[in-house]
Each structure stands twice: as structure tokens, then as C-alpha cells.
Image (cartoon, rainbow, N blue to C red):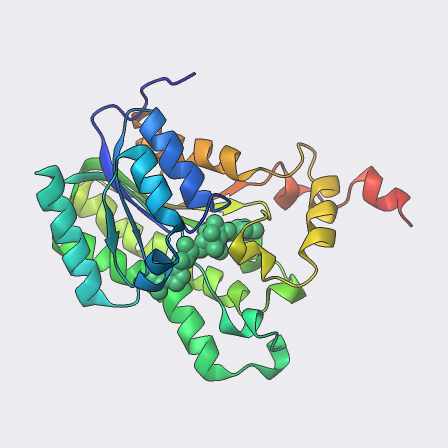
């Protein structure tokens, strides 16, 4: 049942690719909660066409932007400000891609051009986005910016490959830029560390199905679904979390603080 948590709030959602995407679920829920959105993704993702269905369903404009290109981000943010005829209240960065993962290059034998590209897309794009939002003064006071991350930034998960390093960098940007956004704009910046989830990006990780089961059996509350992640994102966009900033927030059913569970031990 909707609660109008985001009534009169306006924002941009990056990263809805298909109906499995976490950003797809966030977009739907934001609308349900009374928010108004612009959808964006890389031009190549727009050409795939799936996102048009979401745009039609939600009656939301879809604007292309490659998040690694500052000029495209500037264009996007300006168009969003013009479209809404005012500043934004929330932004979701739900972007990730590793060529080493995709092309099955082992962590110990990376193609560093691919590493660089993956880092630009998955991590540095967050700094580029924040910098454009900051310099354009694009957010209202008490606005909220969220990016999605994974616990491989803190602990080793060998199959996560170079995405682990990208996520560590991403989380650090949220803290570093979060300071300036808090101090000078009264805007919060956080990352949500989500359970493994069956999506296009998630499926690139080798052994995902076994890992999903391991994670499910380790977490006292079970894995968090993409829809539950959307609910958490909405709470961070709402006025109920105004003083939460510069945090990496685990949304993982308790996985991050569980050493081992009974179910896992019994498997041995
Ligand atoms: P997804 O594949 O649906 O979303 C990734 C998005 O990144 C796609 O929409 C893709 O088009 C976009 N993208 C790639 N390159 C881009 C570029 N140059 N410019 C703009 N957008 C670009 O997968 P998912 O799982 O919804 O991923 C969303 C976020 O959640 C990512 O940051 C991912 O690392 C994170 N995450 C995912 C988990 C999982 O198990 N699926 C677990 C924890 C975090």
C-alpha cells in the first residue's frame, strides 16, 4: 500500500536495463510513492529498447547518457532541471560492469585496459555524476543520492574479480563527496550494500547460483530481493532519513555480520 513517502519529490534513476534490474524496481516504487522521475541509461542500453516499456508504464521521459562522459552527464542534468522546472530531490546510481568478469579473465591475469574501463563505468562515473550535480547546484536541500554496492569491497569473494576494487572505490567516493555535499548543500550521499541478486550484472559473476544459496543460508533473514532493495532506496530518498549520510548501509539480511550459520556447518 503506497504511503506517499516521495510526494512532490523529483529525481533521476540511472541503470534500469530490464525488469530484473534493481533500478527498474526502484523506478516503479518511487512512482508508486508519489515521486516524479526521469529514467536514464547508456545509449547502447536504450537501443535495446526494454526501458521504453518502463518509460511508457510510468509516463517518464527517458534520456540517454553514458555515465563515463561528463559532457553527457551535464547535458542530462540540465535537461532534467529544465524538465522539472526546478531542482532534484533524489538520484540513484545503479551502474556496474566489468569486462574482466564478462570475458572471464581471472583476477590474477586481468586485461588492464578492461580494468580501467570497468573502473570508469562502475566507480569513477559516480564521482563524475556527483561533481556535475554539485557544480550545477542541482539538488534541493535535504536531497538524497544513493549508489549500489556489494560487500566484496570489504571482504574477499574471489569470483567478484575487479568489481571488488571498483566497489571499494565507489564507497570511498560516497564518504569523500558526502562530506562536501553535507557541509555545503545539506544533501546526503550513501551507498547500499545489497545481497547478491539475479540481474544481468549479477549473472556475469561465475557461480552466482551456488553463491546465492550460500548467501541465503548464511543470512539470518535470507537474501534481500531487488524489490526489497527498492524499498530501502525509497526510505533513503524520503524525509525519514535526513541525517543519514556518508554511510555504507548493508541491506543483506544480516549476511555481513554473520560468521557462519548452522545450515552451512551442517553441510560439512
Ligand atoms: P543491471 O545489469 O540490470 O544494471 C546495471 C546497469 O548499468 C545497466 O542498466 C547498464 O546499462 C548500466 N550501465 C553500464 N554501463 C553504463 C554506462 N557507461 N553509463 C550508464 N549506465 C551504464 O544489474 P543490477 O544488478 O541491477 O546492477 C545495479 C547495481 O547494483 C550495480 O551497481 C551493481 O553492481 C549493484 N549490485 C548488484 C548486485 C547483484 O547481485 N545483482 C549485488 C550488489 C550490488
Indicate the position of residue 20 as horizontal and vertical percent values: 51, 45
- Looking at the picture, tell me which residue is in the foreground, 47 or 138: 47
Q: Quadrant of the N terminus?
A: top left
Residue in the picture at 34% in, 24% down = 33
- Picture quadrant where residue 53 is located: top left
Residue in the picture at 12% in, 42% down = 83
Indicate the position of residue 216 as horizontal and vertical percent values: 70, 41
Q: Is residue 253 above or below residue 158?
A: above
Q: Is residue 86 left or right of residue 187?
A: left
State ligand 1's quadrant: bottom left
- Looking at the picture, tell me which residue is in the foreground, 61 or 5: 61
Q: Is residue 212 above or below residue 67?
A: above
Residue in the picture at 60% in, 48% down = 196
Q: Is residue 244 above or below residue 197?
A: above
Residue in the picture at 42% in, 70% down = 119
| Residue 245 visible from this viewpoint | no
Q: Is residue 51 above or below residue 26?
A: below
- Picture quadrant where residue 113 is located: bottom left
Amino acid at each position: 500500500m503506497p504511503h506517499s513517502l516521495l510526494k512532490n519529490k523529483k529525481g533521476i534513476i540511472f541503470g534500469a536495463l530490464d525488469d530484473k534490474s534493481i533500478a527498474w524496481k526502484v523506478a516503479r516504487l518511487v512512482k508508486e510513492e508519489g515521486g516524479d522521475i526521469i529514467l536514464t541509461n547508456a545509449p547502447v542500453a536504450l537501443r535495446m529498447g526494454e526501458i521504453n516499456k518502463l518509460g511508457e508504464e510510468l509516463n517518464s521521459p527517458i534520456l540517454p547518457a553514458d555515465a563515463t562522459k561528463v559532457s553527457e552527464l551535464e547535458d542530462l542534468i540540465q535537461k532534467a532541471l529544465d524538465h522539472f522546472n526546478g531542482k532534484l530531490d533524489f538520484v540513484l546510481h545503479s551502474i556496474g560492469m566489468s569486462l574482466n568478469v564478462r570475458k572471464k579473465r581471472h583476477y590474477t591475469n586481468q586485461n588492464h585496459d578492461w580494468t580501467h574501463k570497468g573502473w570508469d563505468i562502475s566507480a569513477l562515473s559516480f564521482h563524475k555524476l556527483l561533481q556535475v550535480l554539485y557544480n550545477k547546484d542541482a539538488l534541493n536541500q535535504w536531497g538524497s543520492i544513493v549508489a549500489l554496492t556489494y560487500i566484496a569491497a570489504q571482504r574477499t569473494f574471489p569470483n567478484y574479480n575487479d568489481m571488488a576494487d571498483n566497489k571499494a572505490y565507489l564507497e570511498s567516493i560516497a564518504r569523500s563527496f558526502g562530506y562536501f555535499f553535507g557541509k555545503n548543500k545539506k544533501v546526503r550521499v550513501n551507498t547500499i550494500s545489497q545481497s547478491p541478486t539475479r540481474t544481468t550484472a549479477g549473472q556475469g559473476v561465475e557461480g552466482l547460483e551456488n553463491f546465492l544459496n550460500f548467501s541465503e543460508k548464511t543470512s539470518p533473514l535470507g537474501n534481500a530481493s531487488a524489490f526489497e532493495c527498492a524499498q530501502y532506496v525509497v526510505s533513503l530518498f524520503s524525509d525519514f532519513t535526513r541525517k543519514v549520510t556518508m554511510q555504507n548501509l548493508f541491506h543483506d539480511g544480516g549476511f555481513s555480520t554473520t560468521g557462519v550459520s548452522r545450515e552451512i556447518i551442517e553441510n560439512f
